[in-house]
Amino acid sequence: MGRVARRYIAGETLEDALAAIRRLNAAGAEATLDVLGEFIRDFSEAEATARGYEAALDGIHAAGLRSNVSIKPTAFGLLLDEARCAALIRGLAERARRLGSFVRLDMEDSPCTDRTIAMCRAFRAEGLPVGVVLQAYLRRTERDAAALAAEGVPIRLCKGIYREPAEIAFQDREEIRANYRKVLRILLAGTAKVGIATHDDALVDDARAALAELKVPRERYEFQMLLGVREPLRDGLLRERHPLRVYVPYGAAWYGYSVRRLRENPALAGHVFRAMFGG
């Protein structure tokens, strides 16, 4: 597992993560920093996570790096105490505003969806620099995308990795791809910045076509990829001068993160192992 993790985890320390971001910036990419940890059991862990993110924002700013941060609300205590969770995230978003940065609220499994979207809306109403993630495999996402796009909320669109029942989530790969394509066009027709988060060649090709068809300016979108995954595809997008951001996770909780990601998404495991062995 350590060998797998080294491919797409920056390391255990902030210094490791900042070094990875510096390399990505030099190659023309921006970054999103993620301090690993989710589904915590004690609120002291949430407070420690918040301190870790504050240090990360300060480190990014001090080093003059091109990176924002991405957080999982459950790592801030969403499932323990929603009000205290919101207070911690608000404090981080206020810090990001002072530093000219941005906080992305990651989307987790379906019990968190409504609460995460509501939190994002509340923070934006306070003028805080936050956005959220939508998952194309959820049947509700087309409706959420239309509403959030109309509100000007910055969105990262991904397929989704959590196991969800068929009543609320598409199960077939082609159905998920079809919904991704539909939702992406809804978002690109809006006014806010769109993160096109995928390693799927078919979806990347379709996104290229949609960007050209809708004449989307460079400042309104970016491709987003995971550290260490599909690097030739990443480099090709950079050569084509598309804006691109790489998700850079780091921290001592790398083992649990790795196990969960590989268990929840076997396709990701395939990408990682092909990257490891040059496939």
Image (cartoon, grey):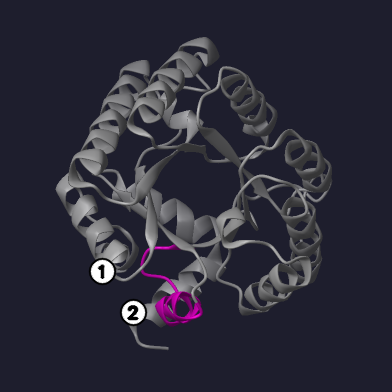
Identify which residue is drawn at 38% across, 58% down: 30
Locate the C terminus by quadrant: bottom left
Q: Are marks 2 and 1 in contact (CB under 8 Å)?
A: yes
Residue 11, above or below 68: below
Q: On the picture, is 252 further left or further right than 196?
A: left
Magenta highlight range: 225-240
Measured in 3D between alpha carbons, the distance from the residue under mark 2 to the one under mark 1, in whole angstroms, is 9 Å
Check disc 1 and report its element: helix, strand or loop. helix
Depth check: 114 or 268 in front?
114
Crowd tier of the residue under label 2, counting other residues whose Cα lies within 10 Å: few below 14, some 14–19, many 20 or above = some
In front here: 171 or 98? 98
- The residue located at (43%, 82%) in the rendering is 232
Whether residue 1 can be seen here: no
Outermost residue to the bottom: 279
Which comes before the other along the chain, label 2 or label 1? 1
In the rendered structure, which amino acid carries the disc numbered 1?
A: Arg
Q: Is residue 238 magenta?
A: yes
Residue 223 in view, yes or no: yes
Element type where label 2 sits in the image: helix
Q: Image quadrant of residue 172?
A: bottom right
Residue beneath the point at 33% across and 79% down: 276
In reply to whether residue 40 is colored magenta, the answer given is no
Q: What residue is disc 1 on?
A: 3
Left or right of 170? Residue 134 is: left
The residue that mark 2 highlights is 276
For label 1, count other residues whose C-alpha is less than 10 Å away and answer few (under 14), some (14-19) or many (20+).
few
Tell me residue 19's x, y (percent).
Answer: 19, 57
